Amino acid sequence: MKVVIINGSPRKNGNTSAAVGLVSEELAKAGIDSEVLNIGGMEIRGCMACNYCKTSGTSMCVFTKDLVNAAAQSIAAADGFVLACPTYYAGIPGTMKSFLDRLFYSGGAGFRHKAAMAVVVARRSGGEDVFHQLHNYFHLAQVVVAPSQYWVVGHGLDKGELLQDAEGVQTIRGNAAGLAWVMKLIKSGAENGVNPPEREDRIYTNFVR
Ligand SMILES: Cc1cc2nc3c(=O)[nH]c(=O)nc-3n(C[C@H](O)[C@H](O)[C@H](O)COP(=O)(O)O)c2cc1C
């Protein structure tokens, strides 16, 4: 089984990388491989609402020079995925936000019923806001969110400081163990005829017509 981890920090070997390392280690204990995509330092433009991904029938983003389309295919082929990033002004860092808007708008249908978890790093405040913002993508993609003992926010400023946050480390490790468990439940369900609900044709109302 395999998990794709999106690391939205531009800092090499920073606290988000440390958190991602904890997740990968815990998944490896459960026999699950991780593929890490470090997108935080890349040039990634935002969605321009051209709807090419919908109208072309490709479910691909019109911008092809970055990792968005490749990441969508990797996640669709994996059993689970992880969104990890630091907190910038109590929000998702801009590069990660641009990446996620395009990733989920174009390829999100392929993530339906995958298992997922979010990991956030903050120096002090705003991490919970980012955690909730990341879950907006999960919920609209009908992802199965792995259980956690607490909001998954680890604290640190200098590189690697997160590893001194004992409760943060435990929460990250525990959530990764929960992710492995959910992935195995989904696989076992599929093998035993417990399938997700059929997708109904979507009703869209925008409240003015
Ligand atoms: C532009 C910017 C904005 C930040 N805003 C916040 C913030 O709102 N709250 C906070 O606790 N930390 C904030 N931080 C600190 C980072 O979240 C923190 O240092 C984190 O460990 C960085 O993760 P990294 O090592 O993976 O890059 C900010 C850092 C930067 C560069």
Image (tube, rainbow, N blue to C red):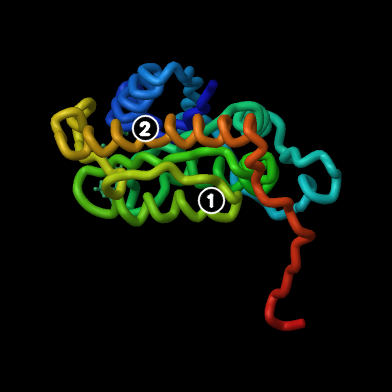
**Which kind of residue does numbered mark 2 sit on?**
Ala
Q: Please identify the quadrant where the C terminus is shown.
A: bottom right
Q: Is residue 101 left or right of residue 39?
A: right
Quarter holding residue 119: top left
Q: Earlier in the sequence, mark 2 or mark 1?
A: 1
Quarter of the image where one finds residue 77: top right
Residue at x-position 56% and y-position 36%: 186
The residue at which mark 2 appears reads as 176
Q: Residues within 10 Å of mark 1 (few under 14, many from 20)?
A: some
In this picture, is 103 found above or below 14? below
x, y percent for residue 188: 56, 31
In the rendered structure, which amino acid carries the disc numbered 1? Tyr
Residue displayed at 76% across by 58% down: 200
Residue toward you, 53 or 75: 75
Residue 67 appears in view: no
Q: Residue 197 versus residue 169: which sits nearer the camera?
A: 197
| Foreground residue among 99 and 142 | 142
Q: Compared to 163, does 123 lie above or below?
A: below
Whether residue 47 sits left or right of residue 57 in the image: it is: left
Residue placed furthest toward the right: 56
SS of the residue at dot 2?
A: helix
Residue 190 relative to residue 168: left or right: right
What x and y, as percent, mark residue 22?
Answer: 31, 25
Q: Residue at x 49, y 41 (%)?
A: 95
Q: Residue at x 19, y 48 (%)?
A: 124
| Furthest-bottom residue in this view | 208
Q: Is residue 87 visible?
A: yes
Residue 16, labelled with which disc? none
Mark 2 touching mark 1, by CB under 8 A? no
**Which numbered tag is attached to residue 137?**
1
